[in-house]
Image (cartoon, helix red, strand yellow):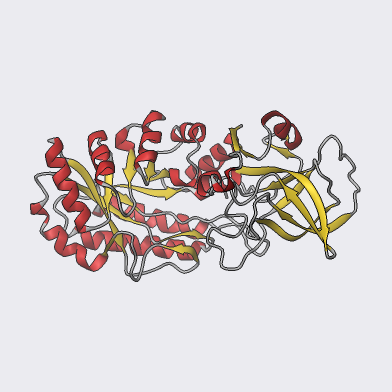
Amino acid sequence: MPTLFFVQDNQFFANRPIAQLAAEHGTPLYAYDSQRIRQRIQDLRILLPAAIGIHYAIKANPYPPLVRAISALVDGVDIASAGELDLALQAGINPHRISFAGPGKRDSELEEAVAAGVLINAESINELTRLAAIAQKLGRKARVALRINPAFEPKGAGMRMGGGPRPFGMDEEIVPDLLNDWGRFSSHLTFEGLHIFAGSQNLNGESIAAAQRASYQLALHLAEHAPAPIKTLNLGGGFGIPYFAHESPLELSPIVTALTEIAQDAAQRMPEAALHLELGRYLVGEAGIYVTRIVDKKVSRGHTYLVTDGGLNHHLAASGNFGQVIRRNYPAALAQTSATQSAHRRTETVSVVGPLCTPLDLLADKINLPMAEPGDLFVIFQSGAYGASASPQGFLSHPAATEVLL
């Protein structure tokens, strides 16, 4: 099984004292452990069939040094904007290892993607039409895969991106006719494959395995209508990590079984296809921490508040404002500083809030911590994905969080 990083050391990260990291880089701070990321990918390589590639979804964490480091460990990257395309190219990633998905791609983004030669996961017939016109204008063929909105939706996904009406991809029932009529696009678009991503942040291995099997069967059906053999098949991802006390780490064995069956069958029935997973959070989420310093401590009508120098403007997800239906605390701890070395401090129940003028700026509610004082460090774990870049860092014009790859 892959190494689990959910159990964290409150005082050290990447073999460095957290207090030392804060002293060197300041707070608020995101720190990422490159060795943990490398270990997670190595563990997956050992378990997965060799025929299943691993792509990194840059949206999970686009910190440039992290992207450069991880690009050498994976088979490709998936992007969702022209900004991420520029980041990937600047990181030295070969355009043939880049795929571009996302609804609402602007013409300027499509033009940049065609010029670069990356694979474009088309989300609608309208997008295909615009893409063909852009390719014609540039005098080159665009590489295209179709993103499919499957009729099924996986159980247990934190965010469902397939099944029912969705803004993502093309409903599976319209795709056979589209592929049968591909001749109208063939002068300007080269069909390469399919992208089927049904949901994310799923901790149910059986559910993910069922979705992968269903995705593969759907791909086989659509391949019967395709104008050319499938060269690439994105089977999605959705691998979750545990954030809250009641959650358990993802059990990979059902997924490995399903992917082994798929890889063996595809070798016979889809021999030209490169199969891959699209993973983001699972690769980097547990390899990051957010460190913020307590600047004030106050009691309001009997309840104690710790006020920190960073808040939802840096870590929107920890505040509960990035998709949580019921707000829960991320795993968090108090890190010792040079002024607070006692290992036997009494504990107290507090709420940890940021510096913003909104009651939404709540990093931890009614959490039990050692007695804290201004100057102490508050650390939020599981912070390597959807952190700094997924937060409104311009809100109230506070300084941006510092990021560092260790």
Q: Is residue 140 visible?
A: no
Left of 263 or right of it: where is 381? Answer: right
Count of numbered badges drawn on the protein:
0
Left of 158 or right of it: where is 81? Answer: left
Q: Percent from the top left, x then y, of residue 198?
A: 39, 61
Left of 268 or right of it: where is 296? Answer: right
Q: Percent from the top left, x then y, of residue 374?
A: 81, 44
Residue 296 position (above or below residue 18): below
Residue 173 position (above or below residue 241): below
In the image shown, does 100 or 22 lie closer to the viewer?
A: 22
Left of 5 or right of it: where is 81? Answer: left
Q: Percent from the top left, x then y, of residue 225?
A: 16, 59
Quadrant in which residue 169 is drawn: bottom left
Q: Residue at x 39, y 60 (%)?
A: 212
In the image shown, does 127 or 108 lie closer to the viewer?
A: 108
Residue 106 position (above or below residue 67): below
In the image shown, does 86 or 194 lie closer to the viewer?
A: 86
Q: Residue at x 66, y 45 (%)?
A: 310
Q: Is residue 39 visible?
A: yes
In the image shown, does 174 or 325 lie closer to the viewer?
A: 325
Q: Percent from the top left, x then y, of residue 72?
A: 44, 32
Q: Residue at x 47, y 40 (%)?
A: 62
Q: Quadrant of the C terminus?
A: top right
